[in-house]
Amino acid sequence: GENVEQHPSTLSVQEGDSAVIKCTYSDSASNYFPWYKQELGKRPQLIIDIRSNVGEKKDQRIAVTLNKTAKHFSLHITETQPEDSAVYFCAASIRQAGTALIFGKGTTLSVSS
Amino acid sequence: ETGVTQTPRHLVMGMTNKKSLKCEQHLGHNAMYWYKQSAKKPLELMFVYNFKEQTENNSVPSRFSPECPNSSHLFLHLHTLQPEDSALYLCASSQEGGGRPQHFGDGTRLSIL
């Protein structure tokens, strides 16, 4: 069945460093890849997304890259701040025309000052 | 203000009880979803409704029964639950069609005694 692998499961960085989280997906029909941030006790919030016709997208300190051939996409956070500490989830759409998403297991990012 | 409201926020019930979770979205979306989030597990898709029609049922036990009376409301009816069903249940909504971001509610924290 469809699957999304996410690595690493935990990531600790110093404030100001960069953080990279990587995901791979199995369904070649997937064409939408959102990233969510979930702070402790709060709901997941969309932070950035990318569609399969785009290789890279950037929004201030956050960027996402997509390699369709390798079925691989990554989240890059530059100049990390303590408030970036949270669990980050990648996701991939299931089937080209469908609305459902399959999520990775999440990465707990800790940014220390 | 999330646009997706879930009630109750917390629920404690015995294994023989019957209860319902409610979700309401004010975003004009026409697709709604139920997810289960357990500790150290990915978000697990349970059900998908598009235009009030169920389009996904991810092998969910029959003790969970969804209901979608209209595009703005989604219920999850619970009966004879097991301790392993204790989790955070998240509702989300989106526009129908591929590549649409999902907006989450704050979830219902369910504890089964």
Image: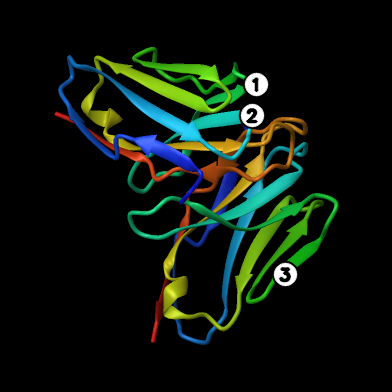
The kind of residue on which mark 2 rests is: Asn
Mark 3, residue position: A58
User: Helix, strand, or loop for circle 2?
Assistant: loop
Mark 2, residue position: B30
User: Which residue is nearer to you in this view: B90 or B3?
Assistant: B3
The kind of residue on which mark 1 rests is: Phe
Question: Disc 2: which chain?
Answer: B
Instruction: Tell me the residue at 43%/31% (across/down).
Output: B23
Residue A93 location (% of width, % of height) = 67, 39
Name the colour scheme: rainbow
Residue B51 shows which numbered tag?
1
Q: Residue furthest right?
A: A53
The image quarter in which residue B31 lies: top right
Question: Do marks 2 and 1 both belong to one polypeptide chain?
Answer: yes
Question: Disc 1: which chain?
Answer: B
The kind of residue on which mark 3 rests is: Lys
Q: Are marks 2 and 1 in contact (CB under 8 Å)?
A: yes
Q: Of the residues under marks 2 and 1, which one precedes in the sequence? A: 2
Residue A13 shows which numbered tag?
none
